[in-house]
Amino acid sequence: MNVVCVGSGNVATHLAMALKVAGFRLIQVWSNTFANAVKLAADLEAEAVAELSEITVDADFYIISVKDDAIAAVCEAMPAVKGIVVHTSGITSAEALSRFGNHGVFYPLQTFSKKRILDFKHVPLCLEAGNTVIMDTLKSVALKLGSPAYEIDGGQRRILHLSAAFACNFVNHLYALGDLILGENGLDFDLIRPLIMETANKVGNYRPLEAQTGPAMRGDEKTMAAHLTMLKDRPELAHIYQLLSNSIKKSQG
Amino acid sequence: MNVVCVGSGNVATHLAMALKVAGFRLIQVWSNTFANAVKLAADLEAEAVAELSEITVDADFYIISVKDDAIAAVCEAMPAVKGIVVHTSGITSAEALSRFGNHGVFYPLQTFSKKRILDFKHVPLCLEAGNTVIMDTLKSVALKLGSPAYEIDGGQRRILHLSAAFACNFVNHLYALGDLILGENGLDFDLIRPLIMETANKVGNYRPLEAQTGPAMRGDEKTMAAHLTMLKDRPELAHIYQLLSNSIKKSQG
C-alpha cells in the first residue's frame, strides 16, 4: 500500500514511521511548515510537497494528522482522491472527510512525544468507517502495525478522548505539580518516580476506585489541613488540592 | 535483629513481610483490632499481643505504623523500650517518638495495597534519626530490604508527602474519573490502560512539563469547549476539568 502523510506533528510522525517499519511505502508528506515536511519525508524516503494540491491522487491510503481546527481547510485544498482518507482525531467527526468517497477514522488512543519511541502494540487504534470494505482495510493496517484495533463510533471516540484528558493530560499535569512542589524545596523528582510507576502499575490489575489511597480516602482531616497549610502561598495548588480531595471523599462515600 | 510490628495496615503488613523475607525475625505484632494482629502474626510466625503494655522491651527494632492520629496514644501506652523505635509516617515529626531514647523515621515513599505484592527495591525509604548510630542502623535495614535510602529531614519529608498526594493520590483519582466517564458510556477501562502506562513511562525519562500533551497544552479552545459540553450533566467533573486546564495553560505559558 502506498501512503500519503498529511501533517508532521507527533502523531503523524510516529504513525508514518511505524507504517514504514511495518512495510508500507510512504510516498508523500505535506506539512503546514514545509521544512518539517522535508525533514519527515527524508526519514520516510518520501517526497515532500509544499502545496496540498500537489498530493497525488494515486495513493491507497491518506492520513490526515493535523490540528482539529485545520482538518476542514486541509480537506478543501486536497485533490478529490479515490484511496481511503482517514484522520487521526479523537474529537472530529468522520463526516469532516465526507468529500472523499472512501473515508474513515484512525484514532490512536495514546500520548505521543516526538523524542520517545513507542511500540505500536501499546497503541490501541479506534477505527471508524462508513462500510465494511473500508473497515476491513483499516483493520488490516492496524494488524500490520501490531496494534489492538477497536470499532469505535464517533460518540464513543469523543468519550474516550475526554476520558484521556483526565487519565493522561491532567495526570501528567499533576506529576508536574508534584515536581514543582519538590523543586521549590530542593528535592529531586527522581524521589517520586517509583511512586508514579507503582500508581500506574496498580490500575493495570485493579480498578482505580479500589486502588485509591491517601488522606482524602481515609478521611484524615488533620493531614489534609497540614497539607493545605503548606500550600498557603500557592492558592491555585490549594484550590486543586481541595477540589480533588472533596471529589475523592465523594467517590469513596 | 528482632523486630516488633505495631500496626497491621497496608504499610505495616508490607514492611513486616519484606523484613521477614530479608531475614529479620519478627517477634510480636500489635494491632488496634486484635484479630488483625493474630492474622499478620501468623504470616510472620510472630506472637500477637492484645495490649501495647505486653510489648517486649528486649527487641532491637520497633516499627510503629498506625494512623497519624493514633501515634501519640500508642507511644504513651508502650513500655519504655531501649531498642530503636521508628514510625512510618510522612507527616508526623520524629519528635512524636521522643519518649524513646532511640528513635527515628522510616517513611516508605510508595503506595501500598494489601493484595498487591511490591518489591522493596521500588520503595524509596526516607530516613531520619537523631544521631549517626541510629541512622547507620536504619540504612543497614534499608540495604537488607534492597530499598534506595535517603536521609530526609522532617520538613523535606512533609514536602515529599504533599507531592505524593498530587502525583499518586490525585492521579489515581483522575484514573477513577476517566473510568467513571467510560463506564457511564459502556466503554471498558481496558481501552485506556495502555495510555495510563505510557503517561507514567514518559516521565521516567522526561520532566512532566516537557511531557505534557493535550488540548489545554496546545491552547485548543474548541476541543476544550466540546469536552465541557460533554460534561454538562457533571458539574463537578466540569469544574475539575476547567481548573486543571487553566493550571496547564498557566504552567506552559
Image (cartoon, coloured by chain):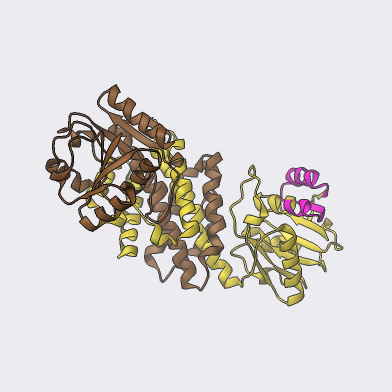
Chain colours: A brown, B yellow
Which residue is at the front of the view, B151 or B206?
A: B206
Q: Position of residue B166 (x, y in %)?
A: 47, 58
Q: Is residue B23 above or below residue A233?
A: above
Q: Is A140 in front, or is B11? A: A140
| x and y, in percent, of residue A92 in the image | 24, 40
Does the magenta portion include B65? no
Which corner quadrant of the image does residue A56 belong to? top left
Which quarter shows the N terminus of chain B?
A: bottom right
Locate the C terminus of chain B and report the quarter of the image it occupies: bottom left
- Magenta span has B20? yes
**Image check: A119 left or right of B127?**
left
Name the image quarter holding residue A72: top left
**Viewer-nearest residue: B55 or B119:** B119
Residue at 79% in and 50% down? B50
**Observer able to see residue B219:** no
Left or right of B245, for residue A33: left
Exactly how many numbered labels are in the figure? 0
Residue furthest to the bottom in view is B131
> What is the magenta range?
B18-47
Residue nearest the observer in this picture, A3 or B108: A3
- At 70% from the left and 58% from the top, the residue drawn is B146
Q: Say whether residue A63 is visible.
A: yes
Looking at this rendering, what residue extends furthest in the right direction? B58
Q: Position of residue B81 (x, y in %)?
A: 82, 66
B187 w.r.t. B3: above or below: above
**Position of residue A108 measured from the top left corner of the image (x, y, whole percent):** 36, 41
Residue at image point 66% right, 53% down: B11
